[in-house]
Amino acid sequence: MDTHVHDRRRFLALAAGAAAAPLLTACGAGFGGNDSKSDGSAADDITGSFDWKREKGTTVKALLNKHPYTDALIADLKSFTARTGIEVEYDVFPEDNYFDKLTVDLSSGRASYDVFMLGAYMVWQYGPPGWLEDLGPWMRNSAATADEWDRADFFPNLLQADQWSLKAGAPLGRGGQYALPWGWETNVVAYNTEVFGKLGLKPAESFEELTELAGTIKRKAPGAGFDGMYGIAVRGSRSWATIHPGFMTMYARNGLKDFTVDGGKLTPAMNSPEAVAFTEDWARMVKRGGPPSWTSYTWYQCSSDLGAKKAGMLFDADTAAYFQAVKGASPASGKIAFHPGPKGPDGSLATNMWIWSLGMNAKSKKKSASWLFLQWATGKEHLRKSAITHNHIDPVRRSVAEDAAYKDKMRNLPGFLETFETVVDQTRIQFTPQAQFFDATTSWAAALQEIYGGKGAQSVLDGLADDLAAKVG
């Protein structure tokens, strides 16, 4: 699940300092890891027929975040080595210092790691300084890429999320392919079927209904035998990660934007009359039906409360609910169902997402071997195995999502597959790409806390917009 909710002050400081460093230029890579090419892509050096064994005897170094997807990858690494003759050495760090480690290494130019995990939002931070290899030329080279890798099998909105022109405000899906989607999370509503049944409730189809549901559960659940249960768990800590799951999903379903873009200039839009009204409504929902200590809530508290029967609903990553819903995982397991969540006023189910991706260091000396690793790790065979035998939950590939064994595994979770299939094509990154993303969304979360605390939404959001305009303009 997306454990990326820790305070990002250290990450922001490191990234800001690194962004001030001279622009790093990606170097080319030769066949045996002899990278001296300075013009074009190292992928151009790969010619002839495709061969999984072309880098036999090479060792690739990977930096990985502690995560269920990482567990699945490590468990299957022998398959990669057997196929390619390439060994993989790896370091695994918990998320509270993972991005610090990655940022320092990339900004140093040392290339201690050839490949690594990153979120799609990090492309906006790491791409402009030249730290990420453009994988597009590798994907397009039939000598470098196996036919069975099948680019068309990826859900296109996921592949596009890691593709960008490196220009602030420019839409995703154009420019270089700076990472590959590996695992992702869509943001939907999960709910306790037991309390819904006892109170005669049904999932909300509008935001007004969701607010009403949250308040009803908080008022009536204790009397129905659910002591201490409140209505809805959503994130509230002073972190960028508070904004991106449920809040940004509902914000986008209301047709709202974080920034408008005109002639390459970004203008904050979270203080528009419509955005102010929505933000007031969100704060009202949390007050009526949210957790008492909401301003400290990360994904972990939200997920745990759903599992402990403290929250009647969760509006967050589907994986945050999944790990509470599976058999024996929590007191609420077997009693959690999934729903796409409220539609926008025009019926929109626009949904924000988080993607764990895999990227290549532009300074790597082993790009050919690294590309073999990346295409194996994002290939059909490994991802199918990871989804079926491990906890690689939301498939990035259509073939895995449609696989009978995967569907059989997920069918015991009421509504999971139906919800996934309903929102998958409408799920994308709803934010405007720009390098100040983490700073901007952390400030946005702080503003949301102030509004929740009783300050006027218009004045708070006007102040936020003025502050951000100076930073992104």
Image (cartoon, rainbow, N blue to C red):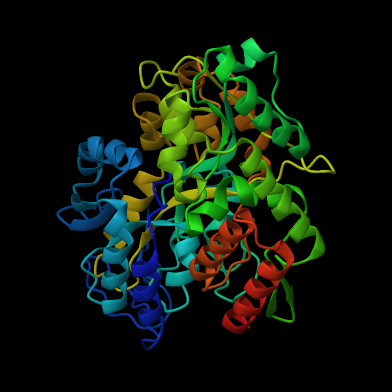
Residue 67 position by quadrant: top left
**Closest to the observer, 416 or 457:** 457
Q: Residue furthest left?
A: 57
**Closest to the observer, 372 or 296:** 296
Residue 169 showing in the rendered view: no
The picture places residue 472, in percent across and down from the top left corner, at: 59, 79
Q: Residue furthest top?
A: 198
The picture places residue 199, in percent across and down from the top left corner, at: 66, 14
Residue at screen point 77% across, 55% down: 277
Q: Residue furthest right?
A: 346
Residue at screen point 26% across, 75% down: 35
Quadrant position of the C terminus in the picture: bottom right
* Image position of 378 (left or right of 108): right
**Closest to the observer, 323 or 155:** 323
Residue 209 showing in the rendered view: yes
Quadrant position of the N terminus in the picture: top left
Residue at screen point 54% across, 62% down: 446
The picture places residue 465, in percent across and down from the top left corner, at: 66, 74
The picture places residue 280, in percent across and down from the top left corner, at: 72, 53
Depicted 61 relative to depicted 461: above or below? above
* Image position of 4 (left or right of 53): right
Depicted 247 relative to depicted 395: above or below? below
Residue at screen point 41% across, 45% down: 378
**Closest to the observer, 318 or 190:** 190
Residue 152 position by quadrant: top right
